[in-house]
Image (spheres, rainbow, N blue to C red):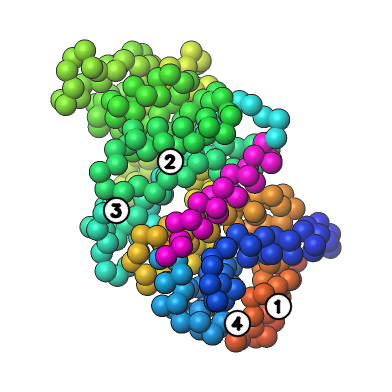
Amino acid sequence: MVTPSLPHQNNIQQIGYKLLSMLNFQGEKVEEVAKTLISACLWNDSVENKSRAYDVSPQTVRNYVDKQGMEVTEKLLERARKISLEILKGVNEIDLSIDWTTKTWYGKPVKGLGSSEKGNSWNYATATTKYKGKVLLLAFIPQVNGMTKDEIVKALVEQVMAMGFKIRLITLDAGFYTVDVLNFISQFKYIIAVPVGDVKVYEEFDGDYTTNSKRRRRDEQVKFRLLVYSKEKVGRKKKSLVYFARATNLDLSKREVLDLYNKVRGPIETSYRNIKAFLPFTSSTKFVFRTLIFVLALVLYSLYTIFKGEVGREEFRLLLILLFPDLFNPENFTFNVIETLIYTIDLFLRR
């Protein structure tokens, strides 16, 4: 059996202490609140359940976050950006991928948020880049009602450029396909997915196309290079072709453009799955509370990227738990550690 190469214990322990220091609430119960939030992320449990293990009420945790959450969230985001900057040290030009993810919270609907389910679904948009196999977060913004798609893209791009990066290429999902977004990203090299139903081209195509938005005058429409390609879909009774479209201003072959889009944009989907793997549950409907725990999960993912290649996501999570009995000590810790240790050993043996 080949023994897996693992991060040094001291490095993992330093991460745990950094996490606690990042949640720098002010008050008598700050340590209990911080441990509750981090423990809920690591155990993939509810904040309310973990609070009881640290002898603090769920309402106390909510009160701390309600009053100080926005400031703490900004500091968490700053830490996530610093992690990415450290990895990208010496890099000046990047390929940028922008997308949003939707998190559905069941319970009482919340007003004032971007939603597809009357307040239960919250959208969080990010800008990432891939470097040496690591998907790195550079910018983040929660989507609220009234925020347009071009405003989201502009805010994320501005955050990235403020970090000193030059954008070599920008890729976006079809959800961002609007005239305003196209006008904005035309200053960069770009590839954006296009809803085939909007362009109504159902055949292999590579040529010029002009938008026909009914909300815009003719002189306000945008011209771009449209690529349409098909994939065979095998149904239960017959095969059929499904068409996909991309808009771009790149002067490359059709195949090169399509491959480049998949290469740049594809990793952002993986990053969202990893972020949600650290996202705890909560019954709170407060905007600040849900935003903070999403950003905390995002920071945990960013810390995990440091060791990507040495250890898997679940191994990273379990190593943090195992190395912190003094910091993350729920009532049933002994039982959980034994169960976790067995699972960790099993993961290593399956390599």
Location of mark 4 (residue): 330
Structural crowding at the residue carrying mark 2, measured as other residues with C-alpha within 10 Å and reported as few (<14), some (14–19) or many (≥20):
many
Q: Residue 311, percent across and down? A: 71, 56
Q: Are marks 1 and 3 in contact (CB under 8 Å)?
A: no
Point out the image quarter for the C terminus. Answer: bottom right
In depth, the one of 215 and 68 nearer the eye is: 68
Instruction: Give the mark nearest the N terminus, 1 or 3.
Output: 3
Q: Disc number at residue 269? A: none
Tell me the amino acid under the disc marked 3.
Leu
Tell me the amino acid under the disc marked 4.
Pro
Location of mark 3 (residue): 113
Location of mark 1 (residue): 326
Tell me the amino acid under the disc marked 2.
Asp
How many angstroms separate mark 1 from mark 3 (CA)?
38 Å
Tell me the amino acid under the disc marked 1.
Asp
Check disc 1 and report its element: helix, strand or loop: loop
Residue at the (68%, 79%) spot, across then down: 337
Splitting the image into 4 quarters, where does residue 227 fall? Answer: top left
Q: Residue 192, percent across and down? A: 40, 29
Magenta-drawn segment: 67-88
Structural crowding at the residue carrying mark 1, measured as other residues with C-alpha within 10 Å and reported as few (<14), some (14–19) or many (≥20):
few
Instruction: Give the mark nearest the N terminus, 3 or 4.
Output: 3
Point out the image quarter for the N terminus. Answer: bottom right
Structural crowding at the residue carrying mark 3, measured as other residues with C-alpha within 10 Å and reported as few (<14), some (14–19) or many (≥20):
many
Count up the numbered dots.
4
Is residue 231 visible in the rendered image? The answer is no
Between marks 1 and 2 in the image, the one whose residue lies nearer the viewer: 1
